[in-house]
Image (spheres, helix red, strand yellow):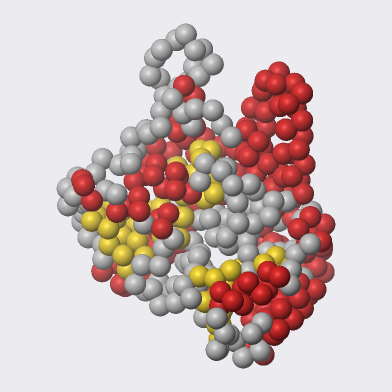
Amino acid sequence: MTVDPQQLESTRSQLRKAMPVATNWAYFDHAAVAPISGPAAEVLRNWLDEAAEQGDTRWLDWARGLGEMRSAAAALLGAETGEIALVPNTTAGINLVAEGLDWQSGDNVVTLDDEFPANVYPWLNLEYQGVETRRVATNDGRVDLDQLAAHCDAQTRVVSVSWVGYGTGCRRDLAAIAELAHRHEALFLVDAIQGLGVFPLDVRSTGIDCLSADGHKWLLGPEGAGIAYVSHDCLARLRPIGVGWQSVVHAQDFSRIELNLKPTAARYEGGSHNMAGFLALGASIRLLLSLGVDNVAAAILDITDRACEQLQSMGAKVWSPRSGAERSGIVSFELPGRDPVAVRRHCLKQGVALNCRAGRLRISAHAYNDEQDLAKLEDALRSAT
């Protein structure tokens, strides 16, 4: 990726101005729960005022806002709007496939052994139907395609992986994994929560069949509002779940009871939406799109590369893969001889937000993090005992 230094600093500066948290924290915990953007906060405040002062007289305006949010999500993915479902979280999107396929006893799902539980439990829950979950070992997050292929067979129905490992920060080659899955006539599902919005992705050219991501991490939205992508081809293969009054073509005709499902992924949105949450998420997605996802990615890789240099100068051991396209906004590291939980607690007291995963410290930097934040991080880590 070619980096224009002026563009990089422009992207960082513009996004930082839109992030109120930057005045209070050196925030390096976007892989857990990110602060919401300024535009998202403004939408939430406006919605709250309207809901309190005008009630549902503004409902049609909110509904139009949801349509705009759906279009923005489709643009982010290179998808069609009819392939986007609004879901409350990543787990819900994964379960559209886990609960929607016509499983047969003896079928199997292939995933990785370092997946976040959201991409494990929906598959383990299929054991009662005779479905096996096969978990393939990784090497610090790196996927061995030969090992992945060795776990697939004629009864593999789904290959499901995270785009970016939540513990290691390793970014995976989705196109290569998609080709492998399709070679075995399996669906390819991606848990995209640790990369969506900050790294470019085109679901069509990559070969992704289904995808899910909540908006409360890198997308800078509130919890409880996420998106799922279900390709048109997959809609016909999945049994609709969560069906309700909004699932049908005539959703606003309450007196007409006829199960005529929408021909789009909106069929999964059975009941009332989290209006405030989705409207706010839409504001953050539009912010990221306006900056250019390529530019956001460049700023994130730049700041995490510099963070790794800083950490190594302090004697830290960086565990995250940091070469080429494997890099992400997540950096997992150890400070020899120091308890990661105690270090995190100390850092929080110093105004530096980071986290612990798998017995290691983890920073997850966004495009607005800057040199000032890095200096605060270094001071906090050096003073931790």
Residue at coordinates 17% horizontally, 52% vertically from top-left? 106
Left/right placement of residue 370 relative to residue 82 reads right
The N terminus sits in image quarter: bottom right
Residue at coordinates 45% horizontally, 33% vertically from top-left? 268
Residue at coordinates 33% horizontally, 35% vertically from top-left? 239
The C terminus sits in image quarter: bottom right
Between 272 and 353, the one lying in front of the other is 353
Instruction: Pinpoint residue 369: horizontal percent, then vertical percent.
Output: 74, 67
Instruction: Pinpoint residue 116: horizontal percent, then vertical percent.
Output: 44, 61
Left/right placement of residue 123 relative to residue 70 reads left
> In the picture shown, does residue 287 fall above or below 353?
above
Residue at coordinates 62% horizontally, 73% vertically from top-left? 344
Between 81 and 110, the one lying in front of the other is 110
Instruction: Pinpoint residue 91: horizontal percent, then vertical percent.
Output: 44, 48
Residue 302 seen in the figure: no
Between 96 and 249, the one lying in front of the other is 96
Between 173 and 15, the one lying in front of the other is 15
